[in-house]
């Protein structure tokens, strides 16, 4: 198993802190004031990945920057949420009588995309759920 390099992690977190701070239109000094006990050089050290901090500081940074804590680790939460919303919006725009067919096709290709084959019981339950939610059977 590959071990994480703490210095690389700190650099990523530092870059994300800076991006989030700039998105909020805050100076390093203003962010330090929001945190209550941090000065500009401390914030600069965080952003450069040169200073480690406690978990509680990470939580306080997340709150002050109004960003999910996971985004400070470089995960693009908004992109995932946007993709999910786009998929849901697209599915809802389909004609009602086509939704069961689209659902079945997505379930059939899911193993090729995700890499796991669902067991027969899971497939049957999902088909039943799709029929129940749309109020339609297989009539296309």
Image: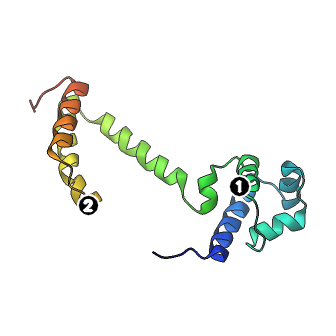
- Is 78 positioned to the left or the right of 34 in the image? left
Instruction: Tell me the quarter of the picture where residue 99 sits.
Output: top left
Quick check: 90 above or below 109?
above
The numbered mark at residue 90 is none
**Cβ–Cβ below 8 Å for labels 1 and 2?**
no
Going by the picture, which residue comes out furthest to the top? 135
User: Residue drawn at (73%, 72%), measured in percent from left and top?
Assistant: 49
User: Residue drawn at (83%, 54%), measured in percent from left and top?
Assistant: 31
Residue sitting nearer the eye, 53 or 91: 53
The numbered mark at residue 115 is 2
User: Residue drawn at (62%, 49%), measured in percent from left and top?
Assistant: 68
Quick check: 109 above or below 9?
above
Determine which residue is flagged by label 1: 23
- Is 57 positioned to the left or the right of 132 in the image? right
Residue sitting nearer the eye, 1 or 41: 1
Tell how many labels: 2
Decide which of tag 1 and tag 2 comes sooner along the chain: 1
Going by the picture, which residue comes out furthest to the front? 1
Instruction: Tell me the quarter of the picture where residue 32 sits.
Output: bottom right
Instruction: Tell me the quarter of the picture where residue 74 sits.
Output: bottom right
- The picture places residue 110, in percent across and down from the top left corner, at 24, 53
Disc 1, SS = helix
- The picture places residue 140, in percent across and down from the top left corner, at 10, 33
């Amino acid at each position: 198993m590959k071990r994480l390099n703490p210095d690389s992690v700190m650099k990523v977190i530092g870059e994300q802190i800076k991006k989030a701070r700039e998105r909020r239109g805050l100076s390093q000094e203003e962010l330090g004031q929001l945190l209550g006990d941090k000065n500009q050089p401390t914030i600069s050290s965080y952003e450069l990945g040169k200073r480690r901090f406690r978990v509680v500081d990470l939580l306080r940074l997340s709150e002050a920057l109004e960003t999910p804590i996971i985004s400070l680790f470089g995960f693009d939460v908004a992109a995932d949420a946007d993709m999910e919303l786009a998929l849901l919006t697209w599915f809802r725009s389909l004609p009602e009588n086509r939704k069961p067919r689209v659902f079945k096709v997505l379930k059939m290709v899911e193993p090729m995309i995700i890499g796991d084959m669902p067991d027969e019981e899971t497939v049957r339950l999902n088909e039943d759920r799709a029929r129940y939610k749309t109020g339609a059977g297989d009539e296309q």
